């Protein structure tokens, strides 16, 4: 919605600046999206007189002009416009002026050897139109030296603000002024509308052809004839007003209806009587009926739409757009003015079906003031007579204008109860009355009659909202939540909510990108990843390939990675945290975290590198999963990494994460080629999936604090051991055994080599580990180091059957 400051001041007696108006509009709930103040942009531009325009000595298409700017000595300007001539008046911009149409700042320049100290401007250069073939040619009586914006009435700021769907009254300047007056920005000007006496009966009758059930489609239809009009261009003030808000003036009759739409939120329509045959009938459209509308397009209608028809057929799509056949033009001498009420829901459905967005539809589907149906017709009639002359008939009214009497019992205490805001009762009364509400009762309890232009006000809470938005939300006090000492405040987030957020941060920190995929996948895909049960099939899927609830996050991530690869981004690392479904019971819905890496998308950095590049493998997926567990604080002392995973992982390159056989928390590994083939995804790809609900909760230690950081002053010692062990023994078993050998001194055990081949017996492998010893109270002697080394060898031998490699 747009309006100009001068237009607003016709309904609001105020001295407020455009900045104050914009701030108040936003404060009362009509958020300002922008202010166009051309007066500031065009302030340096003045009206100038061209004293002389001589041919440029060095260019055929340039002229050297001496220009009187009204500020002293004439100024020399080099101009390339074909219409530059001696004796004309145009718009001058001095050096230092910003030229909006070109996005440059003008300076003193030399053009083909002749100095130019300014510019004579075209409409395009001023940002006022597309005309750039010549400079602006002003009439002879234009005053030299006067700011052009002031003379051309371009100094009226335009305010653009958003209107929420529940505020149809704010779609007219009149209603906006009422809000601003209630907010204390001025005095509301509510001029009474004087009826126009009818000199004769309206020759065109109106019939509402509806069944009793359809009567709501058009409760009332008012029509009036004004004969003997002279239609032509509308007055300059009206054209300027319409142009300012982005409308194109057409002719006086049409411009009046547009003015009424934006000034009073009362859409009207005008018919040329000479083009209307017989009486008007308001009815449902017939299936397949067509109408050529004012936008030049032919629309095919159905029986759900309402039309205005005569003996020729459809003349207008009710409440949406008029027909071209009966439209008014310069030849119109007798005009029928229509003011009607339409069903908002029917107008919205009709507009959507036809794909038509008009100012009339926008207002009718939100609701217009029913009580203004006849006054709006009277106001438009008077404007037609003032601009076009003519004699008006009596009003022909079909149906009955509804008068909704909505009264709300309202205790003033509701304001404080719902908002915490204490407002004096007299102030609340004034606010409601300024907004047009009728208030009657005591200082504690009143009955409030809702005005007809506020269909959105239904109950007490709506009245509270009206009072608070006008009084100001900034008056609502900030009150902290009550805290009863020494009770500890309960956490706001649940454990799973905190885990979701922490997991996302952990995976993003490892260079992975979050994805959000569909919760539905195809039947075959669901079965391949452990789902596909009948109870998880959707009764009404939005697409055939989205027929089942997903049992895993991996299919969506794998397909997303393939889509990236198809577009040239082969090295992708994606993760998702979301719900998976194992059944139709509440406990079967789990929160999972999954990640997929493909190509060269390793945690150290994706893509090729001069030092070499290695493709992702299952250990990258394991690292991602372990990073999540570590970040979540899950104790991993009892975590088992069991070889093999679900069917969708490669059997020899995957593992299951569990705290015992009955407490599986996730999997990681390389995706099985058949699983990738089922998804039409090219491999290889690795991934992991963790069930956040299945992870053990952190141990509660309310009385213990984190221990103080203790750094040893003594140098650590590292010793390497190479063990020969059966090929089936996991390297992790050796690591755990070495850690258990001397827990006070052993602070780190790392596997740095695994070897099979010459020198190692068949069926065996060599596993080399580095054990770090960190003393805390003294430097270790060689004997103490040897003793610990012996313990490590003995413990590893005992737990895994390994022997020290010679």
Image: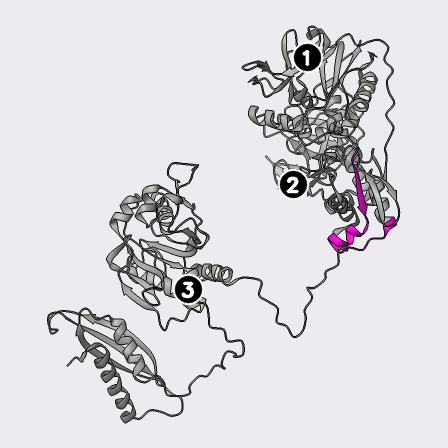
* Residue picked out by circle 3: 695
Q: Residues within 10 Å of mark 2 (few under 14, many from 20)?
A: some
Circle 2 or circle 1, nearest the eye: 1
Circle 3 or circle 2, nearest the eye: 3
Between marks 2 and 1, how big is the CA–CA gap? Answer: 62 Å
| Residue 135 appears in the picture as rendered | no
When the figure is inspected, residue 532 is found, relative to residue 221, above or below; the finding is below
Q: Is residue 524 left or right of residue 302?
A: left
Residue sitting nearer the eye, 199 or 113:
199
Query: Magenta stretch?
Result: 406-426
Residue sitting nearer the eye, 380 or 453:
453
Which quadrant holds the N terminus?
Answer: top right
Between marks 1 and 3, how big is the CA–CA gap? Answer: 72 Å
State which tag comes first along the sequence, 1 or 3.
Answer: 1
Marker disc for residue 106: 2
* Mark 3 secondary-structure assignment: loop
When the figure is inspected, residue 316 is found, relative to residue 784, above or below; the finding is above
Which quadrant holds the C terminus?
Answer: bottom left
Q: Is residue 552 magenta?
A: no
Residue 529: x, y in percent?
A: 32, 50
Marker disc for residue 298: none
């Amino acid at each position: 919605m747009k309006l100009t400051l001068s237009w607003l001041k016709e309904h609001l007696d105020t001295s407020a600046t455009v900045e104050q108006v914009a701030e108040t509009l936003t404060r009362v709930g009509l958020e300002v999206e922008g202010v166009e103040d051309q007066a500031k942009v065009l302030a340096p531009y003045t009206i100038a007189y061209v004293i002389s325009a001589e041919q440029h000595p060095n260019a055929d298409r340039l002229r050297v002009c001496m220009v009187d700017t009204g500020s002293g000595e004439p100024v020399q300007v080099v101009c390339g416009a074909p219409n530059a001539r001696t004796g004309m008046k145009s718009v001058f911009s001095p050096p230092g002026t910003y030229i909006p149409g070109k996005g440059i700042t003008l300076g003193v320049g030399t053009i083909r050897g002749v100095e130019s100290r300014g510019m004579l401007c075209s409409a395009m250069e001023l940002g006022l139109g597309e005309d750039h073939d010549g400079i602006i040619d002003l009439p002879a009586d234009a005053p030299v030296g006067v700011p052009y914006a002031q003379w051309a009435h371009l100094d009226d700021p335009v305010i653009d603000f958003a209107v929420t769907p529940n505020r149809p009254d704010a779609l007219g300047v009149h209603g906006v002024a009422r809000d601003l007056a209630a907010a204390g920005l001025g005095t509301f000007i509510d001029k009474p509308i004087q009826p126009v006496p009818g000199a004769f009966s309206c020759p065109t009758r109106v019939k509402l052809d509806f069944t009793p059930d359809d009567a709501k489609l058009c409760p009332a239809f008012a029509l009036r004839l004004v004969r003997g009009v002279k239609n032509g261009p509308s007055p300059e003030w009206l054209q300027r007003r319409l142009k300012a808000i982005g409308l194109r003036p057409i002719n006086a009759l049409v411009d009046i209806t547009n003015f009424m739409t934006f000034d009073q939120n009362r859409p009207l329509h005008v018919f040329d009587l000479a083009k209307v045959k017989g009486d008007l009938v308001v009815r449902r459209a017939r299936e397949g009926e067509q109408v050529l509308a004012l936008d030049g397009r032919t629309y095919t209608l159905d029986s759900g739409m309402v039309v205005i028809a005569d003996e020729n057929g459809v003349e207008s799509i009710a409440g949406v757009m008029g027909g071209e056949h009966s439209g008014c033009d310069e030849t119109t001498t007798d005009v029928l003015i229509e003011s009607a009420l339409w069903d908002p829901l029917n107008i919205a459905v009709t507009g959507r079906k036809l794909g038509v967005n008009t100012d009339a539809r926008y207002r009718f589907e939100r609701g217009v003031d029913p009580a203004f149906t006849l006054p709006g017709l009277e106001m438009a009639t008077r404007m037609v007579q003032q601009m076009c002359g003519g004699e008006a008939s009596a009003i022909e009214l079909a149906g009955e204008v509804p008068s909704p009497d909505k009264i709300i019992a309202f205790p003033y205490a509701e304001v404080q109860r719902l908002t915490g805001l204490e407002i004096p009762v007299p102030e609340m009364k004034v606010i409601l009355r300024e907004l047009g509400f009728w208030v009657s009762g005591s200082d504690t309890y009143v009955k409030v009659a809702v005005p007809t232009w506020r269909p959105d006000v239904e109950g007490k809470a709506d009245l509270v909202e009206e009072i608070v938005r006008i009084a100001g939300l900034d008056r609502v006090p900030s009150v902290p939540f009550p805290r009863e000492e020494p009770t500890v405040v309960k956490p706001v987030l649940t454990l799973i909510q905190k885990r979701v957020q922490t997991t996302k941060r952990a995976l993003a920190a490892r260079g992975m990108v979050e994805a959000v995929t569909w919760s539905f996948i195809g039947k075959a895909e669901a079965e391949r990843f452990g789902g596909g049960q009948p109870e998880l099939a959707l009764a009404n899927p939005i697409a055939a390939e989205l027929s089942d609830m997903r049992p895993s996050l991996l299919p969506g991530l794998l397909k997303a990675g393939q889509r990236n690869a198809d577009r040239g981004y082969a090295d992708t690392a994606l993760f998702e945290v979301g719900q998976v479904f194992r059944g139709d019971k509440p406990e079967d819905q789990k929160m999972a975290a999954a990640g997929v890496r493909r190509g060269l998308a390793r945690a150290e950095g994706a893509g090729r590198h001069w030092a070499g590049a290695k493709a992702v493998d299952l250990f990258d997926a394991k690292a991602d999963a372990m990073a999540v567990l570590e970040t979540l604080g899950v104790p991993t002392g009892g975590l088992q990494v069991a070889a093999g995973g679900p069917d969708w992982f490669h059997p020899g390159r995957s593992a299951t994460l569990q705290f015992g056989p009955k407490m599986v928390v996730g999997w990681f590994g390389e995706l099985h080629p058949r699983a990738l083939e089922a998804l039409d995804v090219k491999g290889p790809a690795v991934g992991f999936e963790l069930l956040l609900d299945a992870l053990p909760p952190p141990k509660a230690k309310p009385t213990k604090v984190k221990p103080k950081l203790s750094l040893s002053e003594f140098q650590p010692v590292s010793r390497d051991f190479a063990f020969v062990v059966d090929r089936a023994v996991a390297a992790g078993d050796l690591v755990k055994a070495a850690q258990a050998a001397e827990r006070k001194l052993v602070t780190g055990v790392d596997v740095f080599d695994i070897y099979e081949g010459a020198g190692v017996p068949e069926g065996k492998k060599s596993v080399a580990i580095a054990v770090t010893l960190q003393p805390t109270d003294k430097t270790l002697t060689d004997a103490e180091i040897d003793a610990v080394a012996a313990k490590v060898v003995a413990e590893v031998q005992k737990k895994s059957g390994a022997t020290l490699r010679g």
